[in-house]
Amino acid sequence: MNNSEIKILIIDDEKNIREGLAESLNEKDYKVYQAKSSREALSYLNKNSFDIALTDLKMPETDGIEFLEIVKEKQPDIDVIIMTAYGTVETAVEALKKGAYDYLTKPIDIKNLRTYIKNLAERRRLIKENLDLKSKLRKRLELDGIIGTSLKIKEIYDLIDQVSQTDVTILLEGESGTGKELVATAIHRKGLRKNKPFVTLNCGAFPETLIESELFGYEKGAFTGANTQKKGRLENAQSGTIFLDEIGELSLKNQVDLLRVLENHEFTRLGGLERIEIDIRVIAASNKNLNELCKAGKFREDLFYRLNVITIVLPPLRERIEDIPVLAEAFLIQFSEKYNKTKKELSKETMKLLINYPFPGNIRELKNILERATILSKGKTIHPEDLPPSICKSSPYSMKMEVEIGSSIEEMEKELIIKTLSKVGGHREKAAEILGISVRALHYKLNKYNIIDKEAE
């Protein structure tokens, strides 16, 4: 929203005042409407959606408080400003209780009014941007679950768009919890096979003997307990995409079997003779470096080269901390809807802890933390005490200080400043931030307590 989109309705029965206010605001910045009565104003409100209403408190047909209630019922999001030459504290309080944004006393200072409306327009713009962001986050979460605005994640988006329109084999590498399956799903949904099956297999979830039956299926009687024919994941993915997660966990024998399928585009079920041709796209993923596994003799080089046509490396969350706020916002929206709760907000202290936390479990860990906090926290705001203790303990600035009984406030404050400076290596701006005071105030206290750099080292 820019100022040209701001619609303002001015209601005042005095023509000179009404036209004077309109003229002062009716420039390129705003679209201003005038009404001389509440009836005329309601006619405008029934036809248009307004951002701001400036209304006189005393009007012939109805007073401003009554009119305020009617307006807020019709357009709850409008900001109503009451104007009057007979201002009293009681009337102002009543107007604010009824939903007025503010209360101005006549005569109105035009210069101040322009600044006031400009600030109000900016506030509405920020609110709209926030709502738009939430809407986009919800839409992206519904589409592919991949969220972020950092340069690294934007590069991932671009790669997804590029590779999705081809059938090239993709290798996804990244730590656990970085979103490899989400990326695989997004590639499939945006790709040429989006209306065909998307089948997943976690290669680390099955022992060597079971991987074969999971991949290739089996014929009736192929082994003890094989009472019926079963199709494998490869066959179920026909014409679609198969996602082989944690492919680095495959045994060397299973790697040979998979390589043969990738080369010949056919396989046979266990216990069967019929060769089954397949047309599928393969996306593989690993939380280990497959190149290093090849050097260690734990992964076949020929299979690695088959898979490694295009590699997408997903960064850990600690390397894209600028995405933590937007991820947190998306998850809080998701969980508020899932558990039918009012959406929670994060306190500044909580956000600071999350940004400083290394997240060994990456996005999955952040999601679990916020789901827990949504359920267990009281009130609308999530505070540090609502987070798992491990997060508070992991903060690079967390520490305890023992206080001797009988110490004065000044002695304790001096000791706290010394220890905080020591913790941050003498960095005064960081120390001031942790202590919750300005750098100037910190300098004053350093002089007051005669604290020199050597004491804080």
Image (cartoon, rainbow, N blue to C red):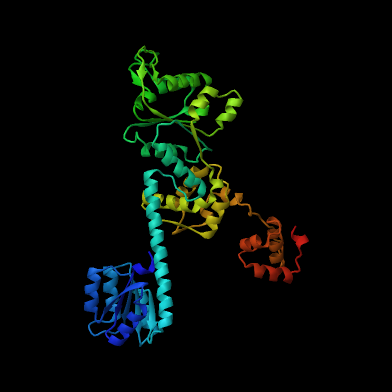
Query: Residue drawn at (76%, 64%), measured in percent from left and top?
Result: 452
Taking 296 as reference, is 246 left or right?
A: left
Q: Position of residue 366 (x, y in %)?
A: 50, 47
Query: Residue drawn at (43%, 39%), measured in percent from left and top?
Result: 162
Q: Position of residue 198 (x, y in %)?
A: 37, 32
Residue 56 or 436: which is nearer the viewer? 56
Which quadrant of the structure image shows residue 62?
bottom left
Vertical arrangement, residue 380 with respect to residue 150, above or below:
below
Q: In the picture, which quadrant includes the N terminus?
A: bottom left
Q: Position of residue 211 (x, y in %)?
A: 45, 22
Q: In the picture, which quadrant includes the C terminus?
A: bottom right
Which quadrant of the structure image shows residue 98?
bottom left
Taking 438 as reference, is 351 left or right?
A: left
Taking 152 as reference, is 435 left or right?
A: right
Point out the residue furthest to the right here.
454
Which quadrant of the structure image shows residue 441?
bottom right
Query: Residue drawn at (34%, 81%), measured in percent from left and top?
Result: 23
Vertical arrangement, residue 44 with respect to residue 179, above or below:
below
Residue 251 is at least partly visible in this image = yes
Residue 182 is at least partly visible in this image = no
Query: Residue drawn at (55%, 30%), measured in percent from left and top?
Result: 290
Vertical arrangement, residue 294 with respect to residue 376, above or below:
above
Vertical arrangement, residue 120 with respect to residue 303, above or below:
below
Residue 144 or 115: which is nearer the viewer? 115
